[in-house]
Image: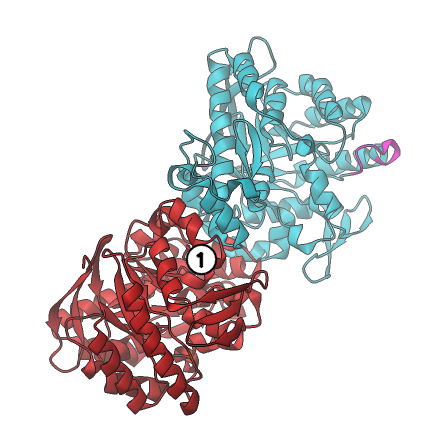
Chain colours: A red, B cyan
Amino acid sequence: MSVSFDVAQSDRTSAARTGVLHTPHGDIPTPVFAPVGTQATVKTLTPDELHDLDATLILANTYHLYLRPGAEVIAKLGGLHAFMGWPGPILTDSGGFQVFSLESLRRVSDDGVVFRSHIDGSEHVFSPEKAISIQEQLGADIIMTLDECPDPLDRDYNRVALDRTHRWAERCLKAHRRSDQALFGILQGGVFPDLRCESARFLTALGFDGYALGGLSVGEPKAKTWEMLDVTVPLLPLDRPRYLMGVGSPEDLFEGVERGIDVFDCVLPTRLARNGAVFTSQGRINLRKAQFAEDPAPIEEGCTCYTCQRFTRAYLRHLYKAGEILGLRLNTLHNLHFLLDLMRRIRAAILDGSLGQLKQRFLATYAAVEDSTGQRAQALSRRRSKQDTAD
Amino acid sequence: MSVSFDVAQSDRTSAARTGVLHTPHGDIPTPVFAPVGTQATVKTLTPDELHDLDATLILANTYHLYLRPGAEVIAKLGGLHAFMGWPGPILTDSGGFQVFSLESLRRVSDDGVVFRSHIDGSEHVFSPEKAISIQEQLGADIIMTLDECPDPLDRDYNRVALDRTHRWAERCLKAHRRSDQALFGILQGGVFPDLRCESARFLTALGFDGYALGGLSVGEPKAKTWEMLDVTVPLLPLDRPRYLMGVGSPEDLFEGVERGIDVFDCVLPTRLARNGAVFTSQGRINLRKAQFAEDPAPIEEGCTCYTCQRFTRAYLRHLYKAGEILGLRLNTLHNLHFLLDLMRRIRAAILDGSLGQLKQRFLATYAAVEDSTGQRAQALSRRRSKQDTAD
């Protein structure tokens, strides 16, 4: 296996740890936040901008890329790294979440899942073997098992779905060929501790290169999200990376890191940016607001991002109101800088034993927003909107 | 006057000349193509990208900026250069063209023009004095007189409008206060040589810092466009810059330069880019086409722009089909690079006496497209579309 993980330092007062995930396309210092590039582009940004932001891992989506432009096209053009011009590590989600959330679902059986394309309505099938084969064509450094994503509060459905997810995980493991790609298993089980533990035990017995917590941050109460981490993470091997899917608000990163999570991804910073909402040390502000119309300050005084070095809130508000694409870019740059910088500080704090203080200091000024674990839930609730299917 | 113009070299076989237009925000080598940043942003690009593309002059629009965010807001924030973060030279159009083309027109009289905002329907008045005062608030290096823009083929209307445009030009000259801004007069007269000559004589007698040819490239036959240049440019003083408004296809740049034009602006490269159409030495190609789906070549082999250095036609097509903003950016970068690079080559060719050969060589492979002088006409024909009012 050419993907490996070294834990460099564990926190003394929490389950947090910092380390390095080695991949064929570079090393990823952990814990890491991965910007989402669903359609082989982190919306509005170039690969060079992502590099300059110090992004070390980005996520792309199997469902979307399989439908458009097609995995074979990407393979012919040299794989996803070459196709999108990003030389660093990439993770592809298996497409399970999209198939089960985008109103595209037709039928599920042990064989696999039949779904319709959100683009042209055409019918397609994902089996565990096919999900792996597509991801091998795409060529990401980290790929994911195909999972079934039920309503997290529906116990009966979760019981059935979990068994299927486990059988699919076994088949994914068997189908997986490329030794230069790490395969992560995805735990499911909704908000039910016994199912979650069962999933952790089953998947760790199979043995994956890493373990993802799926089916969370989809609208369940936040306390449940953290409870599921509390019961499952201790069951996962210390020497394998743990990935909390779909989580990425600043305050949630602290919660996840403290519980031993190494990898996060979320559309939150990029999607918020396109809606005019930007992170500050005080919390989010929305640049649409009239109060910023003549504000000569940057989004955040002292912020070292390109946007804050060069532009005022007044100008950013103007761009937003005028529907100008530059505004979406500049907001995206700032929000990703904010999260990636926070993760840098979190890694440094784990190394020098000050994670608790950093969290306390950060949360003393940062006003969190209620919806923060609900980003994937938002995707669910907006699933009728074609516009929103990608990120 | 702190804006001055030096002609360095005149072509021996045409009226072409190359020189430098000195402004408080930097020198502009001429002939120059100015990318259009209607709403205080050249769509999709940062000021740094424009600088890297070697853009030396950009255009912004008085009508749009007066309505949103407002000239006073921009003045309070330090003027247009500071507001948009562009430290180089800026030219503002007076807004006459927009008022007369965006279905916003209500009444015209000698006093000025009453129009409705395309944003909220509110009523506004532009008088010559107000057009100057707004442009002084914006603070561009080059500002324009308020002109009336009639259908170029309607002689009766052009006769009446020309007299008004001239009276307005006189009042603009009188109203103009800031010595750090050059004021250009705008010639009108439709496609009628006698009216055009009258306009040239009237405005040069008043004495402006430069002269613009307005009311062209709005749908008239291309032969008429060039005829109007042929009859008017010789009447303009040699030591003042000449600006052909709204022209910017590669082949038309040659025609204008040969007739003695120093400054061009056009939404063509940026608007085409957002529609997936990009320039190559063979002519335009449209990346939407299925033939590019697996094309591993850059837009143009050997092109030194960022887009061509890093991305394939296949990827750019994917971005376009997937509705991804990055595609609009990358196409815009390429198209502006193409035009700005062509202008660099044109300037060098005037200097070494090879303009004729350059034109011949360029046009031997470049397949021009019919609509090329009609960019402003397109704006006219699409004037009901709110989307299209800006660029």
Density class for disc 1 (Cα within 10 Å; few <14, some 14-19, many ≥20) is many
Q: Say which chain tag 1 marks.
A: A
Q: Quadrant of residue A127?
A: bottom left
* A199 w.r.t. A176: above or below: below
Q: Main secondary structure of the magenta part?
A: loop
What residue is at 35 percent from the left and 82 percent from the top? A163
Residue at coordinates 49% horizontally, 53% vertically from top-left? B325
Q: Position of residue A285 (x, y in %)?
A: 44, 71
Q: Is residue B232 above or below residue B316?
A: above
Q: Amino acid at mark 1?
A: Leu
Say what secondary structure mark 1 lies in: helix
Residue on which disc 1 sits? A65
Residue located 43% across and 80% down the image: A371
**Closer to the camera in the image, B12 or B188:** B12
Question: Magenta residues, as a range?
Answer: B150-157
Farthest front residue? Answer: A111
- Judge by depth and name the residue closer to the eye, A91 or A206: A206
Q: Would residue A34 be found to the left or right of residue B343 on screen?
A: left
Residue A149 percent location from the top left of the image: 42, 78
Residue at image location 37% in from the left, 68% down from the top: A128
Residue B47 lies, in percent from the top left, at 44, 45
Whether the magenta-drawn stretch holds residue A137 is answered as no
